[in-house]
């Protein structure tokens, strides 16, 4: 990954932090993206397997994301024992804003800032 890519990612994350949106953990963000970007139906067991974590870890993240209104648990109408994790309007809005931050790189324009690679300056000491 180039310095430009890392700088772009850093600026996007700074823009996200400054936006006032809830500060999600990497695990919560990964879970949210899994539900929104991969075909469902999504279950706690399946999400835990995808992330390589335990079901209680996913449940805790889902509790937070559900409290924010970004995901919702929904009982399967065909088999009432199953609970699916589904998308919400608020979650879609949050991800749309996050996508905008990534596109803008947190700098207010649609182009990432160019970062000049500078060579270290050697200073002779007397």
Image (cartoon, rainbow, N blue to C red):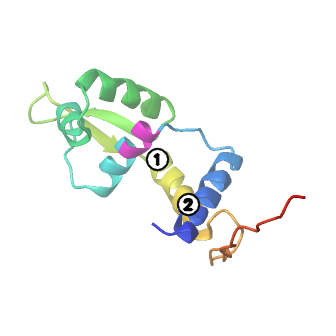
Left or right, 108 with respect to 73, comes to right
The Cα–Cα distance between marks 2 and 1, rounded to whole angstroms, is 21 Å
Q: Which residue is mark 2?
A: 9
For label 2, the crowd category at 10 Å Cα-Cα, with few meaning under 14, some 14 to 19 and many 20 or more, is: some
Give the numbered dot on residue 50: none
- Looking at the rendered structure, the secondary structure element under dot 2 is helix
Q: Position of residue 12 (x, y in %)?
A: 60, 59
Query: In the image shown, does 64 or 1 lie closer to the viewer?
Result: 1
Q: Position of residue 5 (x, y in %)?
A: 53, 68
Up-down relation of residue 72 to residue 102 (above or below): above
Q: Where, by quadrant of the figure, is residue 118 drawn?
A: bottom right
Q: In the image, is residue 21 part of the stretch drawn in magenta?
A: no
Q: Where, by quadrant of the figure, is residue 80 drawn?
A: top left
Question: Residue at (50%, 46%) from the top-left corner?
Answer: 90
Q: Which residues are magenta?
A: 26-30
Give the numbered dot on residue 91: 1
Instruction: From the image, state whether disc 2 or disc 1 is nearer to you.
Output: 2
């Amino acid at each position: 990954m180039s310095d430009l890519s890392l700088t772009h990612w850093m600026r996007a994350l700074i823009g996200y932090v400054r936006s006032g949106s809830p500060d999600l953990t990497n695990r919560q963000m990964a879970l949210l993206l899994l539900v929104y970007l991969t075909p469902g139906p999504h279950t706690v067991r399946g999400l835990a397997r995808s992330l390589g974590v335990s079901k209680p870890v996913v449940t805790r993240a889902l509790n937070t994301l559900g409290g924010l209104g970004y995901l919702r648990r929904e009982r399967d109408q065909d088999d009432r024992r199953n609970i699916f994790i589904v998308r919400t309007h608020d979650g879609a809005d949050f991800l749309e804003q996050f996508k905008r931050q990534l596109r803008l790189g947190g700098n207010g324009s649609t182009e990432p800032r160019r970062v000049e690679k500078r060579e270290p300056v050697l200073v002779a000491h007397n």
